[in-house]
C-alpha cells in the first residue's frame, strides 16, 4: 500500500502560519483507506475501495475562528486554505468563552489499535469475508433477502498546533452487518446483527449471520398491543443508546453552557445506586480508544456516573476552559473537515446482580425490547421511540413479537430514575463498550 | 477532466469491463456560524475527486480517489476492476444495467445572486440580523443559533454508453435554532430554508416568518402539554405531511430496496395501496433542495408519479433497478460524493393537493391531534413501520384546535396509514429542505404536502 506523506504538508502549513500575526492555530491531515463489500438482495453485490486524504486548518485571531480544508495536499492548495482560514478568522468575532488550545502532553501509547492484517488486506481478500456470514444465515433458514456488508478501514492522522502539540496516530477498524428479511405471505420476519472491532480476527462472521437469521425468524407473527403502562426490559443493544445519549448530553460546550437536558445534573442523583458508568479511551485494542483525543490531549479513564450520581462532564479544551479546569481528553475532531466537539469514547456500564432470566420471570406483563433506539431531544430530554423489535412478556414468559407500539413523548431522565434491575450478563462491543440488560419500571406505551 | 474520464472509460472496456462509469465530483462550500450575537466561526472547504464504477464478470466494482491525477485515476480503475473480480465467485446479486441512449449536455443552474459575489462580511452581517430578531424576542430566549451554508457542486458523469454530462448546481441553506428556558423547562424552535439557488434566498428571508417564528415557537412550547396516548385521527401540516410521505412511503418506493427485498410494496405494482385521495410524486425538476436536471448516472430527470389515486404506478429507479425490475429510467440515482456509488434517492417528494380547506378537514373530527413542523423520521422499509417526530401539535376537539401540545411523535404501518388517508387539502407547500441518510450516504432532498387527515395513527405521549 502506498504511504501518503502527511507530515510534510502539515509542516508547510505550520511554517506559513508561524510567520503570520495570529494567536493560535492547529493543522490536521489524515489519510484513510476503506474497503467495503456490500450485501443486497441474494448476497454480495459490490466490492469497493475508497482512499480519502485531506488537510484542515483552524486559525484563532482575537478569539475569532476561521476554518478551511481541502482534499488536496499539494503546496498551492495548502497555502490557499491557510490564507482562507486566516482571512475568515479576521472576519469572525471574539468568542468570550475561548481561552486557548491545549499544549503538548506525553502519554503512554495505547497498544493494539492497528491490525496488520487490515493494513495489508487486499480487496480480493475483503470480497471473501462476508461469505461465512451469509452461509450461516442460510444454514438457519434459506431464502432470505439481505441488506448488509463488511468494511475494513485503515487511517492515519497527523496533528500539529501553535502550542507545540505534534501527534501522529494510526488505527484500524472493521465491521460486519447483516439484515435478513424472510417473508411468509404478508408476514415479515426481519432483524439484524452486527459486530465491530479493531482487528479482523475478532469478528465472528458465522455468529453474526446465524444470530441475525435466528432473530429475524422470531419476528414472524408480530401483533399490535393496547396502550398501557408496562415495564421495559432493554437488550444491551437498546440500553446502549439510552446510556450513550446521557454521556453525549454530559459532553462539551452544550453541557457546560446549559443547553442539554443533563446540564443541570452535575453532582446530582439521577438513578438508583446500581448504575455506574465509566468512560475509558485507553483500553488496549478497543474500538474507541486512542492515545490522544482530537486536540492531542492524553485520554484517561473517567467515572461519569458513580452510584447513580453524575460525577463529571466530558470535556474538550473549550468546555473545560469555561469551567476553568483541565480537559478530560474527550475532544472529537471530525477528520480534516470538521471543527472540534466533545463526546464519549468506550462506555462501560457496570454489570448488576440480576439476570435476563430473572427479569423476565419476575415480570407479570411487560415488553422485552430487542431493538429500539432512544434519540432524545438534547435540549428538552424528550424522546419518542417505536419498539422496532420486541416481545410481549406475560406471566414471566416471553410471548409473541409486537408491532406499532411506541414509547413516545417521554423525558429520558425518567427512564434513568426508573431503572429497576441491571443484569450480570451483557454485550461487549469492540472490546471497549459494555452494556447489560436493563429493566425499567412502568413506561407509558402508545398502541392500538 | 472530461478527456481523463473518457480515457478511463475506454481503458476499462479494453480491460474487459462490460460497463464503466467515471464520475468527477467537486463541492466548494462555505459556512458561517452565529451564536448569541457572535459570528463564532467561518469555514470553507473543497471536496474533489473521481469515483469509478465497473461491471466485470457480471459483478460491480467501485473505487474512488481524491487525487485526480492520471496515474491515480488509472490505479483507481484497477481497484474497481479488482473489486468486481474479488466477488465474482461469491453468492449474490448479478450486476445488471439497462442500456440507455447516451446524453451529452452541460447544465449550469442560473441564480439571481452568485454565491461568490457575496463577501464573508456581508454574509455575517445578514446572519446577525436574522439571529438578532430571535434573540430579542423574549427574555425567555436563552440561546440563538443561525447557521448559513452554501455549496457549489460540479458533477461530470461519463459512461460507456457514451453519456457525458456536466451539471453545476449551487445550493444555499440557512437555519435558525432557538432555545427557550423557564425554570428547568427548556424547549427549542427551528426554522430552515434551502434550495438550489443563489444568495437571493437569503435576501428574501423575512425574519417574522423565519427566526422570529422559531423564537416564538420555542417560547410557546414552554407552556404546551404532552399529548394523549393511543390511536387517533390526525391532521398533518405540509411539513409533517412531507416527512410522512418521505419516510412512510418514499423509501419503500426506491428501486434498490425493491429489488433487494427490503420494501413492503415490492410486489404491489398496479395494486391499490392507498386511498383514492392519495397521489404521490417525486419531482427532481421542481425547484427545491432536491432539484437537479441529470442524476449521477447521467439520466435526464423527469417527474415520477409513484401513486396515482391510490394505485401504485411506479418506483424510483437507477439504471440497475430498471434492469432488474422493469420500468423507465427517469433519473433517481445520486451519490453523496466521488467516494460513493450512485444509489436510488428521492428528490422533491410530495403528496399532490386535493380540494379541501384546513377548516373543512378539521370540521369532521370530534377528537384528534393536529401536528405541525417536522423534526425527524425513520422507517423500517422491509416491515413498513415508520416513526415521525414533530415540533408541536394541538388537540382537535369538535373540529377546533384547542390545547397546545409538545413532545409528540407518531408511529404507524405504511400500508394501513396510506389507506386511512381520509381528507386532502388544497393548501400545498414544499419547504422541508434537508439531508436524507441511506446506506452511509447523505443527500439533498425536499418534501411537501397540503394539510391532510389520516385515521388510526398511533400518537405517542406520556399523558
Image (cartoon, coloured by chain):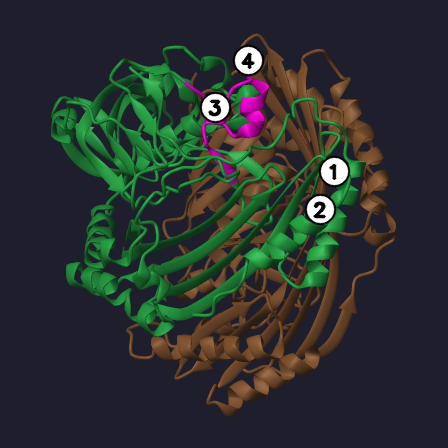
Chain colours: A green, B brown
Q: Residue at x 19, y 54 (%)?
A: A207
On whether disc 1 and disc 4 are found on a single subunit, the reply is no
Residue with the mark numbered 1? A22
Region of the chain picked out in magenta, as a range: A312-332
Please say whether residue A313 is one of the residues in the magenta stretch.
yes
On whether disc 1 and disc 2 are found on a single subunit, the reply is yes
Q: Residues within 10 Å of mark 2 (few under 14, many from 20)?
A: many
Which image quarter: residue B257? bottom left
Label 1 to label 2: alpha-carbon separation: 8 Å
Which quadrant, please, contains the N terminus of chain A? bottom left
Label 4 to label 2: alpha-carbon separation: 45 Å
Label 3 to label 2: alpha-carbon separation: 45 Å
State the image coordinates of residue A287 (x, y, percent, origin top left): 34, 45
Q: Chain of mark 1?
A: A
Please say whether residue B8 is one of the residues in the magenta stretch.
no
Q: Are the residues tagged 1 and 4 within 8 Å (C-beta)?
A: no
State the image coordinates of residue A186 (x, y, percent, origin top left): 31, 54
Q: Residue at x 50, y 60 (%)?
A: B254
Label 1 to label 4: alpha-carbon separation: 41 Å
Mark in front: 3 vs 2: 2
Q: Are the residues tagged 1 and 3 within 8 Å (C-beta)?
A: no
Residue with the mark numbered 3? A382
Which image quarter: residue A428? top left
Q: Chain of mark 4?
A: B
Q: Nearer the viewer, residue A326 or B28?
A: A326
Magenta region's main secondary structure?
Answer: loop
Q: Residues within 10 Å of mark 4 (few under 14, many from 20)?
A: some
Label 4 to label 3: alpha-carbon separation: 11 Å
Mark in front: 1 vs 4: 1
Amino acid at each position: 500500500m502506498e504511504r501518503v506523506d502527511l507530515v510534510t504538508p502539515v509542516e508547510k502549513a505550520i511554517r506559513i502560519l508561524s510567520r503570520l500575526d495570529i494567536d493560535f492555530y492547529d493543522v490536521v491531515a489524515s489519510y484513510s483507506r476503506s474497503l467495503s463489500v456490500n450485501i443486497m438482495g441474494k448476497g454480495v453485490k459490490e466490492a469497493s475501495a475508497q482512499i480519502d486524504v485531506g488537510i484542515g486548518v483552524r486559525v484563532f485571531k482575537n478569539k475569532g475562528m476561521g476554518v478551511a480544508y481541502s482534499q488536496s495536499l499539494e503546496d498551492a492548495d495548502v497555502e490557499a486554505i491557510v490564507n482562507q482560514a486566516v482571512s475568515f478568522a479576521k472576519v469572525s468575532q471574539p468568542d468570550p468563552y475561548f481561552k486557548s488550545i491545549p499544549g503538548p502532553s506525553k502519554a503512554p501509547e495505547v497498544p493494539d489499535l492497528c491490525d496488520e492484517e487490515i493494513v495489508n488486506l487486499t480487496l480480493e481478500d475483503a470480497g471473501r469475508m462476508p461469505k461465512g456470514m451469509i452461509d450461516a444465515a442460510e444454514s438457519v433458514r434459506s431464502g432470505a433477502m439481505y441488506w448488509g456488508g463488511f468494511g475494513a478501514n485503515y487511517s492515519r492522522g497527523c496533528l500539529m498546533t501553535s502550542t507545540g502539540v505534534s501527534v501522529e496516530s494510526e488505527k484500524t477498524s472493521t465491521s460486519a452487518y447483516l439484515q435478513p428479511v424472510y417473508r411468509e405471505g404478508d408476514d415479515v420476519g426481519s432483524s439484524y446483527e452486527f459486530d465491530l472491532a479493531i482487528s479482523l480476527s475478532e469478528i465472528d462472521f458465522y455468529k453474526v449471520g446465524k444470530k441475525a437469521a435466528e432473530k429475524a425468524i422470531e419476528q414472524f407473527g408480530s401483533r399490535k398491543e393496547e396502550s398501557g403502562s408496562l415495564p421495559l426490559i432493554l437488550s444491551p443493544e437498546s440500553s446502549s443508546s439510552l446510556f450513550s445519549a446521557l454521556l453525549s448530553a454530559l459532553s462539551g460546550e452544550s453541557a457546560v453552557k446549559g443547553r442539554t437536558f443533563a446540564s443541570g445534573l452535575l453532582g446530582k442523583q439521577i438513578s438508583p445506586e446500581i448504575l455506574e458508568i465509566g468512560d475509558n479511551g485507553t483500553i488496549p485494542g478497543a474500538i474507541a480508544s486512542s492515545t490522544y483525543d482530537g486536540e492531542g490531549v492524553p485520554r484517561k479513564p473517567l467515572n461519569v456516573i458513580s452510584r447513580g450520581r453524575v460525577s463529571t462532564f466530558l470535556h474538550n479544551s473549550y468546555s473545560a476552559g469555561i469551567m476553568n479546569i483541565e480537559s478530560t481528553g474527550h475532544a472529537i475532531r471530525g477528520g480534516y473537515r470538521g471543527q472540534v466537539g466533545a463526546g464519549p469514547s468506550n462506555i462501560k456500564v457496570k454489570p448488576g446482580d440480576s439476570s435476563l432470566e430473572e427479569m423476565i420471570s419476575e415480570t407479570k406483563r411487560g415488553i422485552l425490547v430487542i431493538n429500539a433506539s432512544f434519540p432524545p431531544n438534547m435540549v428538552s430530554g424528550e424522546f419518542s421511540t417505536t419498539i422496532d423489535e420486541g416481545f410481549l412478556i406475560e406471566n414471566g414468559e416471553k410471548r409473541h413479537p409486537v408491532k406499532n407500539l411506541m414509547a413516545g413523548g417521554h423525558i429520558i431522565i425518567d427512564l434513568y430514575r426508573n431503572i429497576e434491575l441491571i443484569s450480570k450478563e451483557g454485550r461487549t462491543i469492540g472490546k471497549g463498550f459494555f452494556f447489560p440488560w436493563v429493566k425499567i419500571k412502568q413506561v407509558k406505551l402508545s398502541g392500538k | 477532466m472530461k478527456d481523463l474520464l473518457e480515457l478511463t472509460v475506454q481503458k476499462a472496456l479494453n480491460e474487459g469491463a462490460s460497463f464503466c462509469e467515471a464520475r468527477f465530483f467537486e463541492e466548494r462550500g462555505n459556512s458561517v456560524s452565529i451564536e448569541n450575537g457572535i459570528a463564532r466561526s467561518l469555514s470553507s472547504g473543497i471536496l474533489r475527486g473521481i469515483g469509478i464504477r465497473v461491471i466485470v464478470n457480471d459483478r460491480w466494482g467501485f473505487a474512488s480517489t481524491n487525487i485526480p491525477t492520471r496515474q491515480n485515476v488509472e490505479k483507481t480503475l484497477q481497484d474497481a476492476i479488482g473489486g468486481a473480480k474479488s466477488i465474482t465467485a461469491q453468492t449474490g446479486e448479478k450486476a445488471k444495467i439497462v442500456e440507455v441512449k447516451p446524453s451529452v449536455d452541460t447544465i449550469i443552474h442560473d441564480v439571481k445572486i452568485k454565491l461568490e459575489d457575496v463577501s464573508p462580511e456581508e454574509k455575517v452581517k445578514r446572519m446577525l440580523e436574522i439571529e438578532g430578531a430571535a434573540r430579542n424576542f423574549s427574555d425567555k430566549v436563552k440561546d440563538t443559533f443561525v447557521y448559513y451554508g452554501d455549496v457549489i457542486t460540479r458533477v461530470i458523469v461519463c459512461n460507456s454508453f457514451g453519456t457525458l454530462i456536466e451539471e453545476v448546481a449551487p445550493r444555499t441553506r440557512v437555519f435558525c435554532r432557538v432555545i427557550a428556558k423557564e425554570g428547568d423547562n427548556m424547549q427549542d424552535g427551528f426554522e430552515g430554508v434551502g434550495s438550489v439557488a443563489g444568495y437571493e434566498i437569503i435576501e428574501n428571508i423575512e425574519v417574522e416568518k423565519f427566526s422570529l417564528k422559531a423564537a416564538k415557537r420555542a417560547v410557546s412550547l414552554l407552556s404546551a402539554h404532552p399529548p394523549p396516548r393511543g390511536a387517533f385521527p390526525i391532521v398533518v401540516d405540509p411539513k409533517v405531511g412531507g416527512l410522512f410521505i418521505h419516510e412512510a412511503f418514499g423509501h419503500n418506493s426506491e428501486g434498490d430496496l425493491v429489488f433487494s427485498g427490503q420494501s413492503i410494496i415490492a410486489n404491489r405494482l398496479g395494486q391499490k395501496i392507498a386511498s383514492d385521495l392519495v397521489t404521490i410524486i417525486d419531482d427532481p425538476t421542481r425547484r427545491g433542495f432536491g432539484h437537479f436536471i441529470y442524476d449521477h448516472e447521467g439520466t435526464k430527470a423527469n417527474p415520477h408519479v409513484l401513486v396515482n389515486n391510490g394505485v401504485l404506478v411506479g418506483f424510483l429507479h437507477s439504471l440497475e433497478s430498471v434492469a432488474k425490475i422493469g420500468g423507465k429510467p427517469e433519473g433517481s440515482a445520486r451519490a453523496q460524493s466521488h467516494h460513493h456509488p450512485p444509489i436510488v434517492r428521492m428528490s422533491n417528494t410530495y403528496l399532490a393537493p386535493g380540494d379541501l380547506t384546513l377548516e373543512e378537514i378539521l370540521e369532521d373530527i370530534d377528537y384528534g391531534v393536529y401536528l405541525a413542523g417536522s423534526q425527524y423520521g425513520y422507517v423500517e422499509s422491509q416491515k413498513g413501520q415508520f416513526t415521525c417526530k414533530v415540533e408541536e401539535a394541538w388537540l382537535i376537539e369538535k373540529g377546533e384546535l384547542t390545547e397546545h401540545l409538545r413532545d409528540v411523535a407518531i408511529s404507524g404501518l405504511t400500508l394501513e396509514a396510506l389507506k386511512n388517508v381520509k381528507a386532502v387539502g388544497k393548501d400545498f407547500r414544499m419547504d422541508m429542505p434537508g439531508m436524507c441518510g441511506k446506506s452511509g450516504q447523505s443527500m439533498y432532498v425536499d418534501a411537501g404536502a397540503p394539510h391532510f387527515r389520516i385515521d388510526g395513527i398511533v400518537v405517542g405521549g406520556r399523558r
